[in-house]
Image: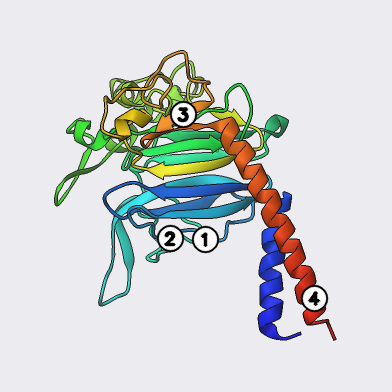
């Protein structure tokens, strides 16, 4: 069998395994910012890395990455990135991972950076996830489960612009104004703000006036180290869409030029509808159950097509 045929079969088999559940979760990244974002990825120690650790995502672009069972790690957005013409070194003004390259290659984000954190297939077979501002904030981010189930399976994130509202002592300025907002821990490096030393327990480390600024703007995001009760979410059998700079929450009518309405249960609204299965954002309403059914139908059809394609290739080019 010739090399191109072998390569195609390898690709089809990998895709087939993904659709069959060996690869358990798909993360879809969407850039709705009016600027380029360079997502960074760091896998937890002891788990296989994903297929990439950093890539470019242009305005309006979407990219999907498959994760294996029990993967854990974090995602973030790097901004204002460039490559030095003389040295070839790649760097970013916010969220830089210090690798000097597009790929972060095992390095995490330099704060301040908005983080999306995941542990897949954890206790009880559930995925655990959150959006964290513990290391500060640099870009709006929304995490939406697709097709998952569970009482606490809902969207989370921080979709407001905290850079403009950042206290002056925490603000990171760039050429065009505020580009990031530090945590109080990074800004002042004291045990009280860093939840360390005598303040290293949930009983002794309490919200500060600075973390409450983050919490007020983004009620579902982690605002300090022990902000677990309102900021950790769980899903079973979900994929996830991670959107940078999601559009303001609107109704379908608003997207057609009619009245705009703030929808209860959005990541910016701390009300009792946080477990709703319907999220409205980016000008349209997405029902999680409808997405799940559509995804399942599409997956089965593609899997069948791939199986037939592999069989036909083997018939045309039998192994010798």
Q: Is residue 2 above or below residue 96?
A: below
Q: Residues within 10 Å of mark 4 (few under 14, many from 20)?
A: some
Q: Nearer the viewer, mark 1 or mark 4?
A: 4
* Residue with the mark numbered 2: 55
Query: In this orientation, which residue lies closer to the viewer: 134 or 139?
Result: 139
Look at the numbered disc 4 and give the secondary structure of its residue.
helix
Q: In whole angstroms, how far apart are the C-alphas of marks 4 and 2?
A: 35 Å
* Residue with the mark numbered 3: 279
Residue extending furthest top? 272
* Residue with the mark numbered 4: 314
Query: In this orientation, which residue lies closer to the viewer: 177 or 59?
Result: 59
- Mark 2 or mark 4, which is nearer the start of the sequence? 2
Query: In this orientation, which residue lies closer to the viewer: 58 or 83?
Result: 58
State which quadrant residue 205 falls in: top left
Look at the numbered disc 3 and give the secondary structure of its residue.
strand
Q: In whole angstroms, how far apart are the C-alphas of marks 3 and 2?
A: 28 Å
Look at the numbered disc 1 and give the secondary structure of its residue.
loop
Image check: 128 left or right of 267?
right
- Mark 2 or mark 3, which is nearer the start of the sequence? 2
């Amino acid at each position: 069998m010739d090399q191109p045929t072998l390569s195609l079969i390898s690709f089809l088999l990998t895709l087939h395994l993904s659709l069959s559940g060996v690869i358990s979760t798909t993360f879809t990244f969407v850039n709705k910012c009016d600027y380029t974002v360079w997502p960074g990825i760091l896998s937890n120690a002891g788990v296989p890395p994903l297929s990439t650790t950093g890539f470019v995502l242009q305005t309006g672009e979407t990219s999907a990455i498959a994760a294996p069972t029990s993967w854990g790690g974090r995602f973030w957005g790097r901004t204002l990135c460039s490559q030095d013409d003389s040295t070839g070194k790649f760097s970013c003004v916010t969220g830089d991972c210090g690798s000097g390259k597009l790929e972060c290659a095992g390095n995490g984000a330099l704060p301040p950076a908005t983080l999306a954190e995941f542990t897949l297939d954890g206790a009880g077979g559930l995925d655990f996830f959150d959006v964290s501002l513990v290391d500060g904030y640099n870009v709006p981010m929304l995490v939406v489960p697709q097709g998952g189930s569970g009482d606490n399976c809902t969207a989370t994130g921080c979709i407001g612009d905290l850079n403009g509202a950042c206290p002056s002592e925490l603000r990171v300025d760039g050429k065009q104004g505020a580009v990031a907002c530090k945590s109080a821990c990074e800004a002042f490096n004291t045990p009280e703000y860093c939840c360390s030393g005598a303040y290293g327990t949930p009983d002794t480390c309490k919200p500060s006036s600075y973390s409450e600024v983050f919490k007020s703007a983004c009620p579902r995001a982690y605002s300090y180290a022990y902000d677990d009760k309102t900021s950790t979410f769980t899903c079973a059998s979900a994929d996830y869409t991670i959107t940078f700079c999601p559009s303001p929450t609107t109704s379908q009518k608003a997207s057609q030029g009619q009245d705009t309405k703030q929808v209860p249960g959005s990541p910016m609204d701390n009300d009792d509808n946080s477990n709703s299965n319907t999220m409205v954002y980016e000008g349209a309403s997405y029902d999680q159950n409808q997405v799940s059914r559509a995804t399942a139908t599409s997956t089965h059809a593609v899997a069948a097509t791939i199986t037939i394609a592999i069989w036909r290739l083997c018939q045309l080019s039998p192994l010798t």
